[in-house]
């Protein structure tokens, strides 16, 4: 799937599950602001598995720095669609986010927020197209402004952030399992799992059917869980 599709799927899954799963799994009842922030950050987290792809959507989201990061992750993980496309990676990212929030404190939380916002901005095409300087500088500027705004509303230790990160990564794996190459969900076991619905990345099924449906579903879910006057009031 394309980066844009992954981001939209992450946003949709968070918006759909936020009122139900965090209370059940984490004993956390989310406020409307938590749902809105989490939806955006989960969209960014849905790009994290593609940090192993130095030519992917997100390779240049922070300019040369992210390009270098993607090459490093690809080298460590064995290349594109290997270790980072597994349940193990989902668990490590969730646990790592929890540990960072718990032991590194507010600066880690804000740093993670900036990173995920930058991914979401790039994937959702909220910056100039291409890989030029204007694109990644815009990403950095918008992510910095967004982080400053979220800082006013986000709790000191947001228990929902590890959930958003893990769910975003999981959304990515599910999306890639709809393509021909699949994903090695139980890495280091190398078998790939796939149910081919998208025969070619960026085809009409993905761009004309799935993405519009997921976008509409996300907006509708957010209206009923975070935006409607009855909820806000």
Image (cartoon, rainbow, N blue to C red):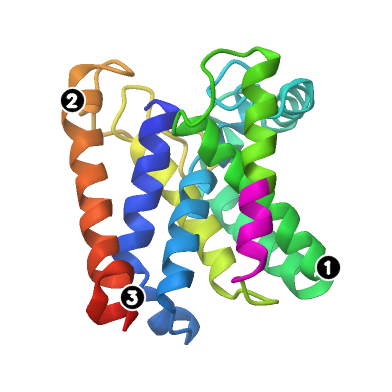
| Residue bounds of the magenta highlight | 145-153
Label ID, residue 199: none
Q: Earlier in the sequence, mark 2 or mark 1?
A: 1
Which residue is painted at 77% across and 20% down in the image? 64
Q: Is residue 5 visible?
A: yes
| Label 2: few (<14), some (14–19) or many (≥20) C-alpha neighbours in 10 Å | few
Place of residue 229 in the rendered image (x, y in percent of width and height, measured from the top left): 25, 76
Q: Is residue 1 above or below residue 221?
A: above
Residue at coordinates 53% horizontally, 71% vertically from top-left?
160
N-terminal of the two: label 3 or label 1? Answer: 3
Q: Is residue 161 left or right of residue 28?
A: right
Residue 49 lies in the magenta stretch: no
The answer to which of marks 2 and 3 sits earlier in the sequence is 3
Mark 1 surroundings within 10 Å by alpha-carbon count, few (fewer than 14), some (14 through 19), many (20 or more):
few
Note whether residue 176 is visible: no
Indicate the position of residue 98 as horizontal and vertical percent values: 67, 68
Quadrant in which the C terminus is drawn = bottom left
CA gap, disc 3 and disc 1: 28 Å
Residue pointed to by mark 3: 19
The residue singled out by tag 1 in the image is 104
Residue at mark 2: 208
Depicted 99 relative to depicted 88: above or below: below
Q: What secondary structure is found at the residue carrying circle 1?
A: helix
Secondary structure of the residue carrying tag 3 is loop
Choose between 129 and 232: the one closer to the eye. Answer: 232
Pick whichever, 32 or 71, lies toward us.
32
User: Farthest residue in the bottom direction?
Assistant: 27
Residue 18 pos. (x, y %): 37, 70
Position of 84 compared to 96: left or right?
left
């Amino acid at each position: 799937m394309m980066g844009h599709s992954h981001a939209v799927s992450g946003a949709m899954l968070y918006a759909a599950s936020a009122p139900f799963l965090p209370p059940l799994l984490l004993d956390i009842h989310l406020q409307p602001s938590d749902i809105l922030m989490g939806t955006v950050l989960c969209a960014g987290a849905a790009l994290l598995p593609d940090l192993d792809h130095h030519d992917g959507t997100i390779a240049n989201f922070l300019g040369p720095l992210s390009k270098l990061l993607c090459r490093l992750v690809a080298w460590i993980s064995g290349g594109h669609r290997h270790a980072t496309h597994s349940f193990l990676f989902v668990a490590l990212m969730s646990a790592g986010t929890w540990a960072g929030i718990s032991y590194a404190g507010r600066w880690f939380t804000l740093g993670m927020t900036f990173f995920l916002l930058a991914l979401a901005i790039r994937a959702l095409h909220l910056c100039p197209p291409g890989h030029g300087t204007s694109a990644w500088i815009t990403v950095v500027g918008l992510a910095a402004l967004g982080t400053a705004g979220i800082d006013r509303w986000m709790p000191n230790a947001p228990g929902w952030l590890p959930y958003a990160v893990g769910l975003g990564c999981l959304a990515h794996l599910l999306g890639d399992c709809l393509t021909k190459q699949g994903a090695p969900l139980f890495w280091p076991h190398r078998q790939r799992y796939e149910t081919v619905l998208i025969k070619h990345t960026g085809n009409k099924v993905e761009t004309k059917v799935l993405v519009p449906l997921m976008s509409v579903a996300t907006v509708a879910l957010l209206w009923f869980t975070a935006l409607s006057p009855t909820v806000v009031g």
